[in-house]
Image (cartoon, grey):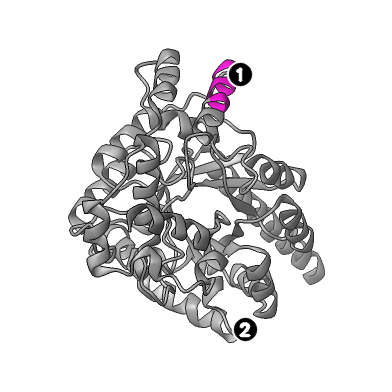
Amino acid sequence: SSKHMSTVNSLQVDFAERMQYNKIKEGRKKMKKLGFGTMRLPLNDPKNVKDIDVAQTEKMFDLFLDSGFEYVDTAYPYHEGESERVVRKALVERYPRHAYKLATKLPTFNLKEPEDCERFFNEQLEKTGAGYFDYYLVHCLTTDLYEVAKKCRAFEFVSRMKEEGKVKEIGFSFHDTPEKLDEILTDHPEVDFVQLQINYLDWEAPNVQSRGCYEVARKHGKEIVVMEPIKGGSLVNVPENVKELLNKMDPSMSIASWAIRFAASLDGVRMVLSGMSDLAQMEDNLSYMKDFRPLTDDEMKTVLHAGDMIRKTIAIPCTACEYCVAGCPQHICIPDYFKLYNERQQTLSHGKSKAYDELAKTHGKASDCIGCGQCESMCPQHLPIIENLKKAAESFE
């Protein structure tokens, strides 16, 4: 009967959908765990974050994809809006759509009203030329930005994009306390994954609480994408005693490899993003992530001990993400000054600094800070930036 045929067709459709879902799940499980983060792409001019070296970026994508890796992560504000455009030039226009998985993010800090969600989403589709996004995240949730997301119905929007097939999976990136993460995941069990800052330096750090956030995500049964595994390069240029400790375990492994592999070894981590800035960094990361070997229990303990050692030496734990810079009314190059200040604290030097004076010619000085607090409201690390600028001004000026 027609009713019977309708039931059979319905079952066939349901079976086909489940088979397709299983294929997606299987593909995800088999995906290599290193993702290409496009926040810190190579530059032609180190002083201009918008002047991206497209030719070198293309070579990096070629090597990445040729080595069997797929996951590419970008966002609306990266490289002051240029990252998504360069992803189009260097990746989307040069490879078939099935060759990579693309993630980008709804810019929560730019939202004013619900209608903005669709406006930014459509702009991102145009900028990337990707047609759809494999992963779409509500970007950089903190206590304040979660209120913005609620006001602008951001979660409802990304869920609708998933229903319409414009997004395959939805999630959010997060920079706040484990308690706030628990609240958001309780409010939004529909998300497929969560993106967290996890590295062995921040695992027990009170301002980031990597371990606490990780445990909350796992309690809710969510898979995790890791950002800042090398903490903006901090876990490459480690103190000499830490370098000796890591080299003693395995001198053939790069210093960066311990940070990437620490994050990738955690249960429930589906992907570790690395913001690679040149071909050499890409080659190094691929060398140990092609055939990923998790850290042993002893290696885990040693790496976490290394984190304790490093924490004692860093005056200002800035990752140079530059979220603080765009809205600074005094145009202060905050991360650059903090980098110089950290270097000065490690070498115990003092007096005039040529590097600082050169930066101050084209940017506001540290002492130009008016204490408006815009930077602190944007800082994913929750740093007391205003107070730290006073320290930099006292040291360099």
Magenta span has 73? no
Q: Can residue 60 be seen in this snapshot? A: yes
Marks 2 and 1, Cα distance to the nearest angstrom?
47 Å
Q: Residues within 10 Å of mark 1 (few under 14, many from 20)?
A: few
Q: Is there CB contact under 8 Å for labels 2 and 1?
A: no
Image: magenta residue range: 298-305
Between 198 and 100, which is closer to the camera in this rendering? 198
Mark 1 belongs to which amino acid? Asp
Residue 322 in the image: x percent, y percent? 41, 61
Which residue is denoted by mark 1 in the rendering?
297
- Label 2, secondary structure: give it: loop
Q: Residue at x 70, y 75 (%)?
A: 150
Q: Residue at x 27, y 56 (%)?
A: 356
Residue 221 in the image: x percent, y percent? 73, 45
Between 185 and 8, which is closer to the camera in this rendering? 185
Q: Can residue 290 be seen in this snapshot? A: no
Residue 102 in the image: x percent, y percent? 44, 57
